[in-house]
Amino acid sequence: MKELGQLVMLLVRGLLLWVVIPLAAVSWVALGPITTASLGACIGWFDLNLYVLLQRVVVRPLTQEAALAWVPLAEMKTTEHRITLLGIE
């Protein structure tokens, strides 16, 4: 059952990243001056919280793992982005 949850999460996250990354880039215009975070940190923050959301909604009902914690907005500036463009960091 654990493998099924991981596969579902991988597929759903892959599809949702097509929506989340442009949304994060647009919201960075509004959040950037408030948090003084870079675009990469903003995208990374959205990606981490998307992962937490999917873990709580998709995977947790299928497994008994403890829920991950949300990354607060105050920590956006220190978030490391993990998304690269064509493998270039």
Image (cartoon, grey):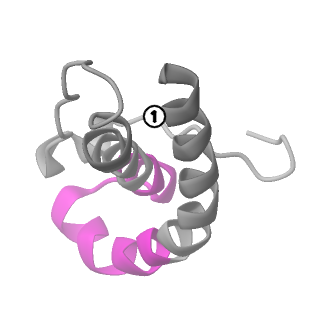
**56 relative to 7 in the view: left or right:** left
Residue 19 or residue 4, whichever sits in front: 4
Which segment did they paint magenta?
Answer: 23-45
Q: Quadrant of the C terminus?
A: top right
Report the front residue among 27 and 49. Answer: 49
> Percent from the top left, x then y, of residue 65?
26, 18
Instruction: Confirm whether the magenta stretch covers residue 32.
Output: yes
- Amino acid residing under circle 1: Glu
Q: Main secondary structure of the magenta part?
A: helix
Which secondary structure lies at badge 1? loop
Q: Quadrant of residue 36?
A: bottom left
Q: Residue furthest front?
A: 1
Instruction: Tell me if 45 is positioned left or right of 19 in this view.
Output: left
Residue 49 location (% of width, % of height): 31, 48
Residue 75 magenta-highlighted: no
Q: Is residue 9 above or below residue 60?
A: below
**Drawn side of residue 39 relative to residue 10, left or right:** left
In the displayed structure, would residue 65 be above or below residue 60? above
- Please tell me which residue is depicted at 37% across the width and 46% down the height of the picture: 58
Q: Residue at x 63, y 51 (%)?
A: 11
- Residue in the foreground of this view, choosing between 70 and 62: 62
Q: Residue at x 56, y 33 (%)?
A: 4
Which class describes the residues within 10 Å of circle 1: few (<14), some (14-19), or many (20+)? some
Image spot of residue 84 (x, y percent): 71, 46
Q: Position of residue 1 (x, y in %)?
A: 49, 24
Q: For mark 1, what is the residue? A: 80
